[in-house]
C-alpha cells in the first residue's frame, strides 16, 4: 500500500478481508475479493469492499430450501468459530426461520482445533436428536470433521450431511480423487458455485490444458472468480482513464507514526480518484469465465446460483441447481432466466439422492436423543372420570382411554420410543391442566398425555397432535316432565302450515263448486245453500267423507290430486301428533348458556377444567358464581340441591365427561341448548417436537383402521339416553316440507279453471246470435238486447249460472231453426231450364 496502489485484489479469507477493508476505506482504494464470502462484509462500514464471488448469504438460503424440500425441521450447524463461520451460520438461522425450521444446536470449534477437540464436539452433537448436519468450515479442517464422524459411526444410515462450497472447492483442486478421502464423504450433499460452460471458460480451460505444468489445470470456481477479478480491475481502470480520471494521491494528516511503531503509516497516501473508480467498477457489465460480471444495488454479483452435488463412489453427481431466481430445479439457471420466475413449493425439484449408508429413502432427520433418558410424560392424576386416565399399580403406572390411545399411536411408529409416565397432581383434586401444559413448555416434561383440551392459549406455548377425541362445552341442568297441553293437537303443524292448509281446503272447494255448478244438481240451490255446500265439501275431504259426487272430468281431476295431498297431510299430522303425545316431554327452566349468562345463579364446573377461564374471560361471568366440583357424585348432589339448597343451577363441562355423567345417573339430568364451543383432546409436546407430527399421522391411522373406535368402546361404553331435552318446536312440521304438494294442487286448480273458462266463453259466443234475433227472452226477457262485442258482466254471470243442459237445448233448437230456414229459402228459388 506504500507504493501508491489504486486497486487491490484479494485476500483469500474473510477474516483478513475484514482487517484490510478498514485500511482501504481510509486510503479510498477499491478492494476486489474473489474468496471472502462472509455476508457481513457487505455492511455499509466497508464501502470500498467489492465481492467478486457469491456471498454466503445466498448459499445459506439454498441450504434452507433443501431443508424445507425434504421436510426437516431442525439442523445442527458445525462451523469454524471465525468471521467466515459465524457470518454464514447467522444467515442460515434467519433463512431457516423463514421456512419454519431452526438450528437446534450450534457446534463451533476454533480454527486450529485438534482432532481430539473435534472428536469431543461431535460426540456431543451425536447425543442430540437432530440428524441433519450443516458443515461450514475451512478446507484445512473440513476433512478432519468427516474423518471423526466416520469413526463415530455418524456416516451411516439416518444421518444427513450438507457441506458448503468449501468441500467441492477442495475436491476440484485435486488432480485425482483420493479413494480414502472419497470414502469419508459417501452420501454427502454439497453446494458448488455454478459457473456456466461458456465459450470463454472452454477457451481458458483449453489453454491451461496445453500448458506444460499440468497442476495448474486443476482449480476450483474461486480460480475463475480470481481470473475475472483481474479483468474487472483492468477493464474498470481502462474505463476510468478514458473518462478523464487522474491517478493522483494525497497525504492524510490523520495517518502518522506513533512512538515506537514500525507500521510507517505516514508513508501511506490516499487515492484521490478512489470513489470514481469504485463507481466505475460497480457499473461494469461483461461476460467473464465465471459468467456475467455485473453488480446489483447491494454490490452482489447478479444471478447467484449453485450446483447441488451428491458425493458417491469416486466422484460426485449433480442432482440439481439452486438459483435466487427459481430456487431448486433440475433445469440449468441460464434456461430459467428466459422464463418467468417460479418459486412455488410445487415447482421445487431435485434428482434422487444416495444418502449415507447407501440408502435411497430420505432420512427422517431426527432420532430420540442418544443420552439414555426416556421421554418424560406428564399425566394428570385425576380424582373423577378415571375412565380417561388414572393411576395404576402395575406397569406402566397409568391406565385409561387416553393412555391406550397414546400407546397404540406409539406402537405404530417405525422406531422405539423409551418413555416414563409421571403423575402430575396430588390425587386429592384434579390438577389444573393449564399448569400441566406450562410444565411441558418449561421443560419439566417432554410431553403431556391425558384428556387435555386444545385451546388457543395452550397452543401458543406447546405443540399439539391431531385431536383424538372431539369435545366441546355443554350445559347440564335438572329437568322435569312437561304437563300435557289441552292444545297439543295444534302442535304438529306450525301456524303458517295451518293457514296454508285451511286456505287450500277452501280453494279446492270453491274450484270444485265452479266446475260442478252447471252440471251437478248437488251443487245448485239458493246462495246460502251453495255457500254451505262449498264449506262442507271442502272440509269433508279431510276425512274422505264427502257425499257429493263429482260429474265433470275437470272436477274429478282436481279432487283426485287434492285427496292425494290430504292423504299425505293426514299421515304426517297423525305421526307427529302421536310422537308428541307418546314421547315423554321434558322441560327445564335453563334453556342454554345464554340463560346462565343472564342469570345470577351459581354454575358448576369440573375442577381443573379450562371452562373456568372460558366462563370468566369470554362470557364475563363473575368468579363468585362458579363452583368447582371434583367428581360425578358432586355433580349429582349439586344439581339435586339446586341454587336454593346450596347447589348449582347447571353445570358447564365438556361433552365426553357429560356423556359418562348422564349415563351414571340413569338420565336423571339432560343437556340444554346446543354445544357452544368446538374443540378436541390432543397430546401436548414441546414446541417444534417432531413427535407431534409423527403421532398426528399415527392417530389418523388409528382412526382410519377402526382401532380408535375399539379403544373408545372398551373404556367409554355408556347407557343410551337422549342427551338433550325434547324440543317440540323442532318436531313441528312446516310449509317447507309440503310446499311441493300444494304447488301441484294449485297448478291443477289453475289448469282446470282455465279450461273451464275457455269452454264457457265458447258456448257464450255461440249463444249470443240468438239474443240478437229476439229469442233472448228465454234468458232475460226484461233486459234490452246487446251484441256479443259488448256484453255486460251480469249477462255473462247469468249465462254461467244457467244449467249447461238448458244452454245446450237452446243451442240445439236454434241450430235446427237455422237449418229449416236455410232449406225453405232454397226451395223458394226458380230452377233453371234443363
Image (spheres, rainbow, N blue to C red):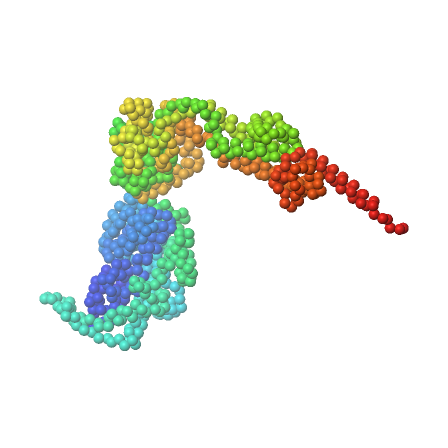
The quarter holding residue 587 reads top left
Q: Nearer the viewer, residue 799 or 276?
A: 799
Q: Quadrant of the N terminus?
A: bottom left
The x and y percentages for residue 478 are 35, 25
Specify whether residue 710 is in view.
yes
Q: Which residue is pictured at 43% across the width and 24% down the height?
A: 485
The x and y percentages for residue 443 are 26, 40
Judged from this view, the residue extending furthest toward the right is 834
Count every numbered label the image shows and give the total.
Answer: 0
Q: Nearer the viewer, residue 608 or 482?
A: 482
The x and y percentages for residue 265 are 15, 68
Specify whether residue 656 is in view.
no
Q: Which residue is pictured at 61% across the width and 29% down the height?
A: 526
Judged from this view, the residue extending furthest toward the left is 259
Q: Is residue 182 left or right of residue 18?
A: right
The quarter holding residue 604 reads top left
Vertical comparison of 615 with 331: above or below: above
Vertical comparison of 214 with 706: above or below: below
Vertical comparison of 229 with 780: above or below: below
Q: Which residue is pictured at 23% across the width and 56% down the height?
A: 82
Q: Which residue is pictured at 35% across the width and 30% down the height?
A: 475
Q: Nearer the viewer, residue 745 or 732?
A: 745
The x and y percentages for residue 201 are 38, 67
Amino acid at each position: 500500500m506504500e507504493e501508491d496502489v489504486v486497486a487491490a485484489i484479494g485476500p483469500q479469507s474473510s477474516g483478513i478481508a475484514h482487517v484490510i477493508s478498514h485500511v482501504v476505506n481510509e486510503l479510498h482504494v477499491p478492494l476486489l475479493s474473489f474468496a471472502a464470502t462472509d455476508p457481513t462484509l457487505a455492511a455499509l462500514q466497508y464501502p470500498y469492499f467489492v465481492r467478486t464471488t457469491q456471498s454466503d448469504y445466498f448459499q445459506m438460503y439454498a441450504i434452507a430450501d433443501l431443508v424445507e424440500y425434504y421436510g426437516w425441521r431442525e439442523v445442527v450447524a458445525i462451523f469454524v468459530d471465525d468471521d467466515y463461520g459465524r457470518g454464514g451460520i447467522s444467515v442460515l438461522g434467519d433463512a431457516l426461520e423463514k421456512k419454519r425450521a431452526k438450528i437446534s444446536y450450534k457446534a463451533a470449534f476454533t480454527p486450529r482445533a485438534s482432532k481430539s477437540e473435534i472428536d469431543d464436539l461431535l460426540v456431543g452433537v451425536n447425543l442430540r436428536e437432530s440428524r441433519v448436519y450443516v458443515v461450514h468450515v475451512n478446507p484445512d479442517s473440513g476433512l478432519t470433521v468427516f474423518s471423526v464422524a466416520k469413526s463415530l459411526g455418524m456416516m451411516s444410515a439416518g444421518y444427513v450431511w450438507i457441506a458448503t462450497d468449501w468441500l467441492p472447492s477442495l475436491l476440484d483442486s485435486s488432480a485425482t480423487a483420493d479413494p480414502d478421502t472419497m470414502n469419508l464423504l459417501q452420501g454427502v450433499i454439497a453446494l458448488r458455485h455454478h459457473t456456466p460452460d461458456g465459450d470463454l471458460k472452454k477457451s481458458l480451460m483449453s489453454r491451461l490444458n496445453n500448458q506444460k505444468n499440468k497442476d495448474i489445470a486443476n482449480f476450483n470456481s474461486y480460480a475463475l472468480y480470481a481470473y475475472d477479478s483481474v479483468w474487472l480491475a483492468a477493464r474498470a481502470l481502462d474505463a476510468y482513464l478514458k473518462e478523464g480520471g487522474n491517478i493522483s494521491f494525497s497525504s492524510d494528516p490523520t495517518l502518522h507514526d506513533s512512538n515506537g511503531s514500525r507500521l510507517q503509516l505516514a508513508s501511506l497516501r490516499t487515492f484521490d480518484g478512489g470513489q470514481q473508480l469504485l463507481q466505475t467498477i460497480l457499473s461494469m457489465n461483461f461476460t467473464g469465465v465465471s459468467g456475467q460480471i455485473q453488480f446489483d444495488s447491494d454490490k452482489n454479483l447478479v444471478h447467484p446460483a449453485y450446483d447441488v452435488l451428491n458425493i458417491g463412489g469416486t466422484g460426485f453427481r449433480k442432482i440439481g441447481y439452486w438459483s435466487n431466481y427459481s430456487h431448486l430445479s433440475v433445469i440449468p439457471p441460464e434456461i430459467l432466466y428466459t422464463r418467468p420466475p417460479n418459486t412455488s413449493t410445487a415447482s421445487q425439484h431435485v434428482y434422487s439422492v444416495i444418502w449415507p449408508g447407501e440408502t435411497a429413502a430420505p432420512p427422517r432427520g431426527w432420532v430420540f436423543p442418544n443420552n439414555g433418558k426416556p421421554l418424560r410424560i406428564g399425566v394428570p392424576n385425576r380424582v373423577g372420570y378415571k375412565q380417561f386416565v388414572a393411576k395404576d399399580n402395575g406397569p406402566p403406572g397409568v391406565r385409561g382411554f387416553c393412555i391406550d390411545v397414546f400407546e397404540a399411536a406409539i406402537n405404530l411408529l417405525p422406531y422405539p420410543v423409551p418413555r416414563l409416565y409421571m403423575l402430575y397432581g396430588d390425587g386429592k383434586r384434579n390438577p389444573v391442566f393449564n399448569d400441566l401444559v406450562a410444565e411441558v413448555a418449561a421443560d419439566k416434561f417432554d410431553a403431556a398425555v391425558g384428556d387435555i383440551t386444545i385451546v388457543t392459549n395452550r397452543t401458543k406455548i406447546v405443540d399439539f397432535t391431531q385431536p383424538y377425541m372431539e369435545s366441546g362445552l355443554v350445559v347440564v341442568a335438572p329437568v322435569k316432565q312437561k304437563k300435557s297441553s289441552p292444545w297439543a293437537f295444534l302442535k304438529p303443524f306450525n301456524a303458517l302450515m295451518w293457514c296454508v292448509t285451511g286456505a287450500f281446503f277452501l280453494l279446492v272447494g270453491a274450484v270444485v263448486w265452479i266446475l260442478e255448478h252447471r252440471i251437478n244438481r248437488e251443487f245448485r240451490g239458493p246462495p246460502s245453500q251453495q255457500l254451505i255446500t262449498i264449506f262442507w265439501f271442502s272440509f269433508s275431504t279431510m276425512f274422505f267423507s264427502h257425499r257429493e259426487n263429482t260429474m265433470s272430468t275437470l272436477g274429478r281431476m282436481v279432487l283426485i290430486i287434492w285427496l292425494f295431498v290430504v292423504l299425505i297431510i293426514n299421515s304426517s299430522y297423525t305421526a307427529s301428533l302421536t310422537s308428541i303425545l307418546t314421547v315423554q316431554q321434558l322441560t327445564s327452566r335453563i334453556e342454554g348458556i345464554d340463560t346462565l349468562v343472564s342469570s345470577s345463579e351459581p354454575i358448576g364446573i369440573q375442577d381443573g377444567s379450562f371452562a373456568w377461564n372460558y366462563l370468566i374471560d369470554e362470557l364475563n361471568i363473575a368468579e363468585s358464581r362458579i363452583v368447582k366440583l371434583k367428581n360425578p357424585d358432586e355433580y349429582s348432589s349439586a344439581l339435586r340441591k339446586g341454587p336454593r339448597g346450596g347447589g348449582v343451577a347447571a353445570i358447564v363441562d365438556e361433552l365426553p365427561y357429560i356423556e359418562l355423567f348422564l349415563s351414571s345417573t340413569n338420565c336423571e339430568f339432560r343437556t340444554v341448548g346446543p354445544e357452544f364451543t368446538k374443540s378436541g383432546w390432543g397430546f401436548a409436546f414441546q414446541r417444534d417436537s417432531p413427535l407431534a407430527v409423527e403421532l398426528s399421522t399415527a392417530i389418523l391411522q388409528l382412526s382410519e383402521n377402526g382401532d380408535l373406535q375399539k379403544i373408545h368402546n372398551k373404556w367409554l361404553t355408556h347407557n343410551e339416553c337422549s342427551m338433550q331435552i325434547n324440543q317440540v318446536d323442532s318436531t313441528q312440521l312446516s310449509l317447507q316440507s309440503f310446499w311441493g304438494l300444494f304447488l301441484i294442487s294449485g297448478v291443477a286448480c289453475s289448469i282446470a279453471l282455465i279450461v273451464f273458462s275457455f269452454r264457457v266463453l265458447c258456448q257464450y259466443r255461440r249463444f249470443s246470435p240468438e239474443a240478437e234475433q229476439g229469442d233472448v227472452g228465454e234468458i232475460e226477457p226484461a233486459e234490452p238486447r246487446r251484441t256479443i262485442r259488448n256484453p255486460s258482466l251480469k249477462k255473462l254471470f247469468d249465462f254461467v249460472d244457467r244449467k249447461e243442459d238448458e244452454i245446450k237445448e237452446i243451442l240445439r233448437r236454434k241450430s235446427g231453426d237455422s237449418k229449416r230456414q236455410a232449406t225453405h229459402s232454397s226451395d223458394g228459388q226458380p230452377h233453371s231450364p234443363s
